Image: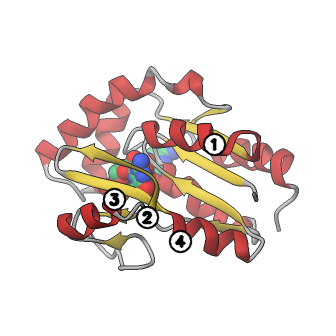
Amino acid sequence: MGKTLIFSAPSGSGKTTIVRALLERFPQLEFSVSATSRSPRGTEQNGIDYHFFTQEEFMKAVAEDRFVEWEEVYKGTCYGTLRSEVERIWDKGNVIVFDVDVMGGMNLKRIFGQEACSIFIMPPSIEELRRRLVNRATDAPEVIEKRVAKAEFELTKATEFDHRVVNDNLNTAIEETVAILEKFIGTGR
Ligand code: ADP
Ligand code: 5GP
């Protein structure tokens, strides 16, 4: 079993922004491309950001036991970690980066144990989280409200993670995360 990094956060906390910065800095990291039943948004590409499945394709993959874990993260929208991604990345000797919801992060930590480092990215406040989702301008207002409502529950799970990083100032949050990674996997570039 190789090493894994698990990043979870309420949507809009800045997890994707931080993970992108880390992927540039640590060449040994590789992003696990999840499957999702939602449609691509913005510039997202199939096979790079997600494997975009229809709901039928997703449930077929569930029946075939192709997921390490999966969740209906939002009503009617499923996301899952494919076993084939885990194998592909470990075969290359790389460290897997999981970007998953809070329940998925807790499940992956339970599965991978000591070989996993779980990091919870926190927004400075719920108001700032809403502001970031509005400014990102990728989700409809009702979707944003669903994500904010879920965030309040998700924040209660932060203590279940190995580390918590508050993303107030982005550069500070990246440097804090880099320090955690250097301890867990060694130095980056
Ligand atoms: P997540 O992956 O957690 O949903 P994103 O990385 O997409 O979040 O970030 C949500 C929005 O907030 C994006 O528009 C991003 O540019 C912005 N953002 C990220 N970090 C910060 C920060 N420290 N301060 C202000 N805005 C931020
Ligand atoms: P988004 O729609 O913003 O890309 O993602 C919504 C949420 O689904 C995020 O919290 C993201 O981390 C989570 N997610 C993405 N892939 C997976 C996965 O494979 N499993 C789980 N459990 N959650 C995922």
- Residue linked to disc 1: 173
Q: Residue drawn at (62%, 75%), measured in percent from left and top?
A: 88
Would residue 164 appear left or right of 144 to someone viewing this image? right
Q: What residue would you read off at disc 2?
A: 66
Secondary structure of residue under mark 4: helix
Question: Image check: 53 left or right of 121?
Answer: left
Query: Which quarter of the figure has residue 43?
Result: bottom left
Residue 70 shown left or right of residue 183 in the figure: left
> Can the viewer see residue 168?
no
Marks 4 and 2 in Cβ contact (< 8 Å): yes
The residue under label 3 is 62
Is disc 2 surrounded by few (<14), some (14 to 19) or many (20+) residues within 10 Å? Answer: some
Location of the N terminus (image quadrant): bottom right
* Quarter of the figure with the C terminus: bottom right
Q: Give the crowd class for mark 4: few <14, some 14-19, many >=20 residues within 10 Å.
A: few
Query: Tags 2 and 1 in contact by the CB under 8 Å rule?
Result: no
Residue type marked 2: Arg
Amino acid type at circle 4 is Ser
Q: Secondary structure at mark 1?
A: helix
> For the residue marked with disc 3, what is the amino acid?
Val
**Helix or strand or loop: what does disc 3 sit on?**
helix
Q: Earlier in the sequence, mark 2 or mark 1?
A: 2
Q: Which mark is residue 84?
A: 4
Q: Nearer the viewer, residue 41 or 78?
A: 78
Pointer 1 residue Cβ closer than 8 Å to ligand 1:
yes
Q: CA distance from mark 3 to mark 2?
A: 6 Å
Residue at 25% in and 47% down: 134
Among numbered discs 4 and 3, the one appearing first in the sequence: 3
Say whether marks 4 and 3 touch (CB < 8 Å). Answer: no
Taking the spot 45% from the left edge, 37% from the top edge, the residue there is 102
Determine contact: label 3, label 2, CB under 8 Å.
Answer: yes
